[in-house]
Amino acid sequence: MHTMSPTDLSILLAEPSDVQRKIIVKHLKDEEVQHITEAGSLADAQAAIAEHTPDLVISALHFADGTGLDLLTQLKKNPATADIGFMLVSSETRKAQLEQFKQSGVIAILPKPFSRLHLGKALNAAMDLLQPSELQLSLYDITDVRVLLVDDSKLARNHIRKVLSNLGINQITEAVDGQEAIQTLNNQLFDLVVTDYNMPEVNGQELTEFIRNSSSLSHIPVLMVTSEANESHLSNIAQSGVNALCDKPFEPETVRALLFKLLEEDHV
């Protein structure tokens, strides 16, 4: 099977600054990306996507005619473009401004300026999403692994489901929050729980504590996905009994390593 490389990627770069576009194009070409379409406004980006569907959109946050979030929302609403990878490049650091992007299943959020390492990692994540690669386990057939996916964001669930499906996990049941997850756990058997942290009703930490305190469920590994950057929060989450923590954006390479550890190494 052909292994995808950056030269195979078709990228739309949406950036209002001519200078910034030139800088990013140079970085992309240094990574051997050859197929780059440029857009200086949301309208130009939308027209370019209508003419040719890219594999990946790399977008700034602010445009004269809208925002990168507007573009991302439009892509996700349209079934024909919902699976296009999206990467944000921004100097924005405020959590509230970036949270909606994290919850929408973006591939990466790169700072301005970003390093070649940042870009290479993000491009690898884009290629991982475009090219399924089944996770090989000796103790399990990955297609038999039953996963409960818990997240109150439908867009986030869609993105996580795609990452898991690309790894060969097909038996995925979804719950919109911890309360629904508890009801589902009481009625079905699972080999793994993948849960968000911030959720209404019952959050990810409370869900994990419920699992750990239940004699019939306490053995189930829990992978928590969180956009929390606060160290005290992360410490509290870790103490609740999660087996692994994964940041949002939910990166395929990181998830592959964590799942291998949870389903293979920890059972040896």
Image (cartoon, rainbow, N blue to C red):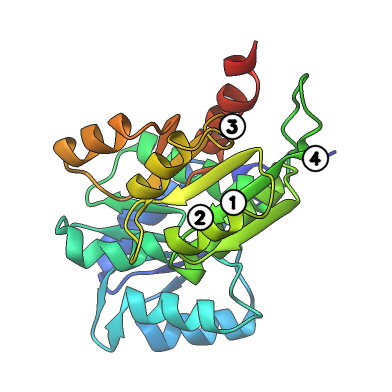
Q: Which residue is mark 4?
A: 144
- Marks 4 and 1, the one that precedes in the sequence: 4
Q: Secondary structure at mark 4?
A: helix
Question: Which residue is drawn at the image coordinates 75% and 43% (left, top)?
Answer: 168
Q: Is residue 117 left or right of residue 163?
A: left
| Labels 2 and 3 touching (C-beta < 8 A) | no
**Which three-letter amino acid code belongs to the residue tagged 4?**
Asp
Q: Which residue is mark 3?
A: 259
Depth check, mark 3 against mark 4: the one in front is: 4
User: Considering the image in quadrants, where does the C terminus appear?
Assistant: top right
Question: Which residue is drawn at the image coordinates 85% and 38% (left, top)?
Answer: 1
The answer to whether residue 94 is above or below residue 42 is: above
Q: Secondary structure at mark 1?
A: helix
Question: In 3D space, how far apart are the residues under numbered discs 3 and 4 (Cα atoms)?
Answer: 14 Å
**What crowding class fits label 1: few (fewer than 14 Cα within 10 Å), some (14-19), or many (20 or more)?**
some
Depth check, mark 2 against mark 3: the one in front is: 2
